[in-house]
Image (tube, helix red, strand yellow):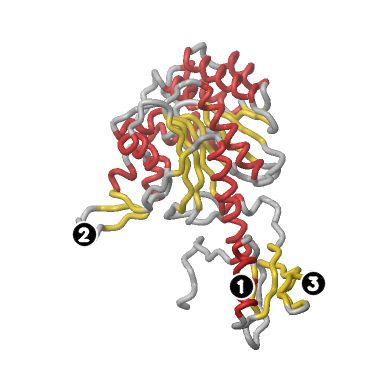
Amino acid sequence: MSAWVLPDHIADVLPSEARHIEELRRELLDTARGYGYELVIAPLLEHLESLLTGTGEALDLQTFKLVDQLSGRMMGLRADTTPQVARIDAHLLNRPGVTRLCYCGPVLHTRPDRPHATREPLQFGAEIYGHAGLEADLEALTLALDCLNATQVRGLIVDMADARIVRALLEACPCDAPRTARIHAALAAKDTSELAVLTRDFPAASREALATLPTLYGDLSVLSEAAKALPDHPRVREALASMAWLAGHVEGARVSFDLADLRGYAYYSGVRFGVYTPGGSDALVRGGRYDEVGAVFGRNRPAAGFSLDVKELVGVVAKRPPKAAIRAPWGEEPALRSAIAQLRRQGQTVVCVLPGHESEVDEFHCDRELARQDGVWAVRAL
């Protein structure tokens, strides 16, 4: 095999895409800062038990593992930043009130989580800790939409579900963790045949309600249908009311519901949402409420947030034109070097033409040049 061939689903990022990714990253972080979110940078590598505590089998399978040559302990390369931020909130900051944190950095997956996806996403996320009310859920959702709007994504669709519904339906059922995972998978895939097999020994009310969930998707009327079709359970009522309240506050996006979509169920404890674009096969953003994420770190306090892959985002936003630049000759003349330095201090891009070579750049459009005019170095249009 050639030395330059990269592993499957791992790729170099070339200048045009790299510039676009960096611009998006900056816009996302600036948008989060506008809401008062503080930037944290978690380590890429951690002890495995810390990295995977309470995250479930799915994240375990996605995590690269290795042995620490200093301690001999097992370590992991993070596949998701959310548990790390929960640890930071619980142990390093340990603030009594509301804490808003954001992050942006690479994560690594042992396998792509969807067709054609990278195994090295650049994960951006924002999380709010310390408030149990729906106001925090709404802030997380609104910030997610504003982040996408800031990057010029249009035609947004918010799809909602709630983890409390299935938890309530399974409450009185004989169901261990592996079986629960298979039920969630069957619901997400709307595989009613598999669901019937998995729930055949459940109480009739729970079995029928679970069989109904895959049919409960669509617009706001779905919530009314669910209220009639599902058991009159306090957590079911609360979940439906929460989704209705949030949907009523969403601006600039269409809202839909899919009450059987429970991807990420190991995290979520309440409303979860995905944000889609027309024609998109999967969500650009996933988020919601995950109050239990900090419990394993000794501080179980309310939490809501979202995350997205900036590398995926760059594929759906409009391409941006090359940056305007100034072409300048190379020379040792003090006046020339001073003029170039002054332009760069002003924020201009100045590309020097080295002796015998015309500069080859794809990311800059040299629409001006630095030339001597009447004995003075000045910029003129090309």
Q: Residue furthest front?
A: 375
Residue type highlighted by circle 2: Leu
Tell me how far mark 1 sits from mark 3, CA to CA.
22 Å
Disc 2 marks which residue?
A: 70
Q: Quadrant of residue 93?
A: top left
Residue type highlighted by circle 1: Ser
Q: Which is more toward the observer, 179 or 340?
A: 340
Mark 1 in CB contact with mark 2 (< 8 angstroms): no
For the residue carrying disc 3, how many other residues have a C-alpha within 10 Å: few (<14), some (14-19), or many (20+)?
Answer: few
Which is closer to the viewer, label 1 or label 3?
Answer: 1
Residue type highlighted by circle 3: Leu
Whether residue 204 sits left or right of residue 94 in the image: it is right
- Residue at 44% x, 36% y is 182
Disc 1 marks which residue?
A: 338
- Residue at 49% x, 39% y is 126
The total number of labels drawn is 3
Disc 3 marks which residue?
A: 382
Residue 152: horizontal and vertical position, in percent?
A: 69, 46
Tell me how far mark 3 sits from mark 2, CA to CA.
59 Å
